[in-house]
Amino acid sequence: DADVTQTPRNRITKTGKRIMLECSQTKGHDRMYWYRQDPGLGLRLIYYSFDVKDINKGEISDGYSVSRQAQAKFSLSLESAIPNQTALYFCATSDGLAGPNNEQFFGPGTRLTVL
Amino acid sequence: AQSVTQLDSQVPVFEEAPVELRCNYSSSVSVYLFWYVQYPNQGLQLLLKYLSGSTLVKGINGFEAEFNKSQTSFHLRKPSVHISDTAEYFCARYAGGTSYGKLTFGQGTILTVHP
């Protein structure tokens, strides 16, 4: 079984709709991250959480919100989706005790299309 | 801001040829660097990392990278590529200080290996 899972894997929605992307992990890590990937731009950090009560904005948080329901679950919401939020979204986890040895483990991604 | 720059967006090569994917980073006191690979329709996985010590780092699947402080580079190399190496490769750095615990990614390099 995969250590980091994302649901759904693909989603097509319309402008203005509310969308939730979910991430679960079985690695026991306390840190979780949400990124979006756009061609030619690499991965950009949307939000990150170092534990259940610690949530922080990344470089592109506008238009997004998150919820850390438990150590193992971290959800990303688009309150009112717009076409330029069409992208590939990745969840990742890492071990908070690792310091610079901060290998992040990625889920398989969610491809979101906003029409 | 601490950053990484990947100098090539696409690199086409023939099978069994050598390849170099280039990455430069902005200089700072402490530098921790990573290379990740993303195979088609998959999440990212770690290839190798430089934290300290030897400047030549060996990773999985025959890849290696050399940390060059004077040239602020961390280029990824493989002496003989296979079709299965076709993927997108990302250089990343660990951000300390006020960005503690986060990774900053480059724009990505798409490696295409032709038969």
Image (cartoon, grey):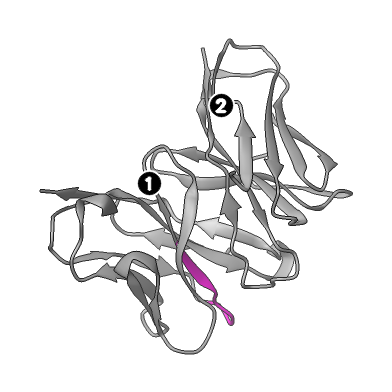
Residue beneath the point at 28% across and 55% down: B8
Closer to the camera, A55 or A52? A52
Q: Quadrant of residue A89?
A: top right
**CA–CA distance between discs 1 and 2?**
23 Å
Residue beneath the point at 34% across and 73% down: B64
Return the residue found at the far bottom. B53
**Given the image, on which type of amino acid does mark 2 rest?**
Gln
Helix, strand or loop at mark 2: helix
Q: Quadrant of the N terminus of chain A?
A: top right
Q: Quadrant of residue A65?
A: top right
Q: Please, what is the dominant secondary structure of the magenta stretch?
A: loop
Pointer 1 local density, CA inside 10 Å: few below 14, some 14–19, many at least 20? some
Residue B2 in the image: x percent, y percent? 56, 66
Give the residue at mark 2: A85
**From which residue to which does the magenta span run?**
B28-35
Residue B93 in the image: x percent, y percent? 53, 66
Q: Is residue A89 above or below residue B79?
A: above
